[in-house]
Amino acid sequence: MKTILLFKEIYAEAFKNLGNYLVRNYFRAFAWFSFVMLLVVLYAFVFRVYTGFAFD
């Protein structure tokens, strides 16, 4: 019984912060992706303004 409790404790410690790590890295990647997409949109807008696109 003591061995089972030891394995349970090792398992709990190993995966305790895994969710926090995954969520933190997911949001970090999502923030960078959003920033890059914003730069693409700003580039497209400036390019259209510079080439004289009519926004009618």
Image (cartoon, rainbow, N blue to C red):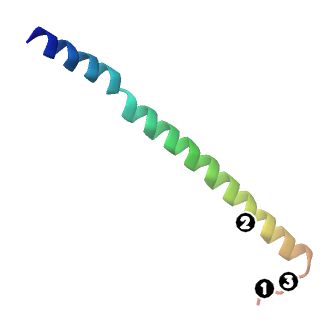
Which residue is the site of mark 1? Answer: 55
Foreground of the two, 26 or 2: 2
Which residue is the site of mark 2? Answer: 41
Q: Earlier in the sequence, mark 3 or mark 2?
A: 2
Q: Please state which amino acid type lies under the numbered disc 1.
A: Phe
Picture quarter containing residue 43? bottom right
Which residue is the site of mark 3? Answer: 53
Real-space Cα separation, disc 3 to disc 2, in angstroms: 15 Å
Q: Please state which amino acid type lies under the numbered disc 3.
A: Phe
Q: Left or right: 46 with respect to 31? A: right
Foreground of the two, 25 or 3: 3
- Residue lying at the far left in this picture: please name it: 1
Q: Is residue 18 above or below residue 52?
A: above
SS assignment at label 1: loop
Q: Earlier in the sequence, mark 2 or mark 1?
A: 2
If the image is split into quadrants, where does the C terminus sit? bottom right
Instruction: Give how far across and how far down residue 36 sits, in percent.
Output: 69, 54
Q: Left or right: 49 with respect to 2? A: right
Real-space Cα separation, disc 3 to disc 1, in angstroms: 6 Å
SS assignment at label 2: helix
How would you rate the neighbour count of disc 3 (Cα within 10 Å): few for under 14, some for 14-19, many for 20 or more?
few
Q: Please state which amino acid type lies under the numbered disc 2.
A: Val
Marks 3/1 in contact by CB < 8 Å: the verdict is yes
Foreground of the two, 55 or 21: 21
SS assignment at label 3: loop
How would you rate the neighbour count of disc 1 (Cα within 10 Å): few for under 14, some for 14-19, many for 20 or more?
few
Picture quarter containing residue 55? bottom right
Real-space Cα separation, disc 2 to disc 1, in angstroms: 15 Å
Q: Is residue 34 above or below residue 25?
A: below
Instruction: Give how far across and how far down residue 45 sits, in percent.
Output: 79, 71
